[in-house]
Image: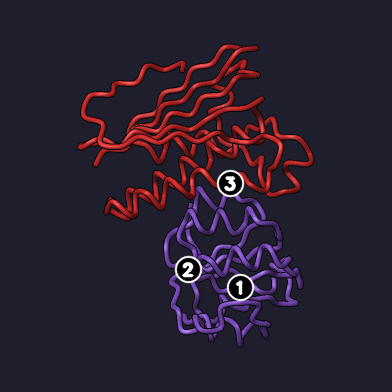
Chain colours: A red, B purple
Amino acid sequence: MIIARDTKDVAMTKSFEVSTDDFSSAGIASSKIKKILRQIGIDSSIIRRVAIATYEAEINVAIHSLGGNIEVLIKSDNIEIFVEDVGPGIEDISLAMQKGYSTATKEIRELGFGAGMGLPNMEKCSDAFHIESKVGEYTAIKMTFNL
Amino acid sequence: MKLRQIAELLECEVIVGEEFLDREVKFAFGSDLMSDVLAYTEEETVLLTGLCNNQVIRTAEMLDLKSIVFVRGKSPTDDIINMAKEDDMLLLRTEHTMYSASGILYTNGLAGTSI
């Protein structure tokens, strides 16, 4: 765990491992989180933003990282999504946040990803976006969605 | 525009979801880049794409996009079709290229989205 969790007022929490071997299974965690939010009656426009941001994050972990996990904390006034991986880390975060900048391989681009919109999309969709990274160690993201 | 009309205009084959042809959409978005679809698509949009892998279905599921037209005659595999079935999606296929399909729908009044 890299970013500290504030577990006060947490109604529900769930954690998902993201596989980096089987790209075709990427998106399963986001899909499950979306279904949970729907079941508990969260407003559909908020679900949409959470789904887009979480899916972009999950794809990033699958494509770029050495392994990671996604944790959702559902509180009474917001939803927090934590995405943390075990490397390789991002050298220049401001560059990574630029629209169109991507380090995706040719194989990944052939699958329709690597347009360089992931991190900017995540920031756009969330009400608060925090990212930190250490090269060779981790990248950690926290996204907050107000209810 | 109803999906039934889109299917006629583009001379589509219905791959799965025939019961959903009376669905209506307000916009169309044509792209082979899933990150652009995630960034720019509104709701009530039909997706035109030549990308044929299961991440297309996953992307559509995240955005509540229920209708997809595969252009350039692309054919999804059975596991893609099954994923789409689980989410009540309508999958169509046309032999038209992205450019022609977009042009046909646009001239018939289906709007695009702005970014």
Q: Distance of mark 1 from mark 3, alpha carbons?
A: 20 Å
What's the residue type where badge 3 is placed? Ser
| Chain at numbered mark 3 | B
**Would you say A21 lies left or right of A55 here?**
right
User: SS for tag 2?
Assistant: strand
Real-space Cα separation, disc 2 to disc 1, in angstroms: 16 Å
Crowd rating for badge 1 (residues with CA inside 10 Å; few <14, some 14–19, many 20+) = many
Look at label 1 and name its amino acid: Leu
Corner quadrant of residue B44:
bottom left
Q: Position of residue B35 (x, y in %)?
A: 58, 46
**Horizontal relation, residue B96 to residue B92: left or right:** right
Residue A27 place in picture, x, y as percent: 56, 46
Q: Earlier in the sequence, mark 3 or mark 2?
A: 2
Q: Does label 2 lie on the same chain as label 3?
A: yes
State whether residue A127 is above or below residue B108. Answer: above
Question: If you read the primary sequence from the N terminus, does the residue marked by circle 2 or circle 1 appear first?
Answer: 2
- CB-based contact (under 8 Å), mark 3 and mark 2: no
Chain letter of mark 2 equals B
Q: Nearer the viewer, mark 2 or mark 1?
A: 1
Q: Residue at x 41, y 53 (%)?
A: A35
Badge 2: few (under 14), some or many (20 or more) residues near its Cα, within 10 Å?
many
Question: Residue B35 has which mark?
Answer: 3
Residue labelled with disc 2: B27
Query: What amino acid is found at the position of numbered circle 2 in the picture?
Result: Phe
Chain letter of disc 1?
B
Observer-nearest residue: B70 or B82? B82
**Residue at point 49% right, 21% down?**
A140
Residue at 32% across, 37% down: A145
Report which residue position mark 1 lands on: B91
